[in-house]
Image (cartoon, rainbow, N blue to C red):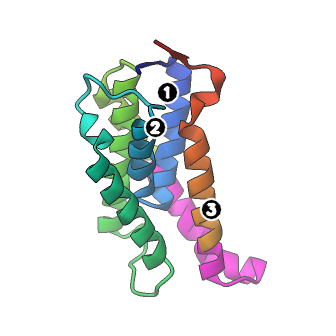
Amino acid sequence: MRRDVGSELALFEIVGLAAITGLRSMAGPALLSRAMRRGDVGRQGTPFAALDSPKVSALLRLLMVGEMIADKTPFIPARTSAPALTGRALSGALVGAALFAAAGRRPAVGAILGVPPAIVAAYAGEKFRLRGPEKLGVPSSVLGLLEDGVVLSFGTRLLRQSWTQVTYK
């Protein structure tokens, strides 16, 4: 099933999913892989068909859940540290490229478009987690759970049916 996606919709999906990778680096690729498995995102004839593999999809979901658990521990470095931010930027580029390829557009452009939202969301999420406990009076781990919920619900809805503007061929 191939998606005939308008440029605006593909851009909206890229920005949204890349922002999710800024919050949880493995969530974007995992949710995208799952959407490919469901048939909500096309992949035939793209360099990203491997994301549709059951094993790849399961591994990405496992990594996403592991990241969500590890995020609540004090041992994880800041998401804006150089290695973490690089990983988030690369995940943003991956989801951007895959979504653009699925829309029949050039993956390189999608990759470039996926990096800034991931970086901005990483900084915004870090600020929320650092300042939220004192401003809201709740522990950082509770804010982390809230962040996980936003990532999962928004990411899943973002890639489902694509806002009724998508036609299937």
Q: Is residue 142 left or right of residue 117?
A: right
Asked which secondary structure carries label 1, the reply is helix
Residue 13, relative to residue 120: is it above or below?
above
Q: Residue at x 62, y 52 (%)?
A: 153
Residue 118: mark in rendering: none
Crowding at label 2, few (<14), some or many (≥20) Cα neighbours within 10 Å? few
Residue type at numbered disc 1 = Ala
Q: Is residue 50 left or right of residue 169?
A: left
Q: How many marks?
A: 3
Q: Which residue is mark 2?
A: 38
Inter-mark Cα distance, 3 to 2: 21 Å
Residue type at numbered disc 3 = Gly
Q: Residue at x 48, y 32 (%)?
A: 40
Residue 149: mark in rendering: 3
Q: Quadrant of the N terminus?
A: top left
Residue type at numbered disc 2 = Arg
Q: Residue at x 38, y 44 (%)?
A: 33
Residue 41, relative to residue 65: is it above or below?
above
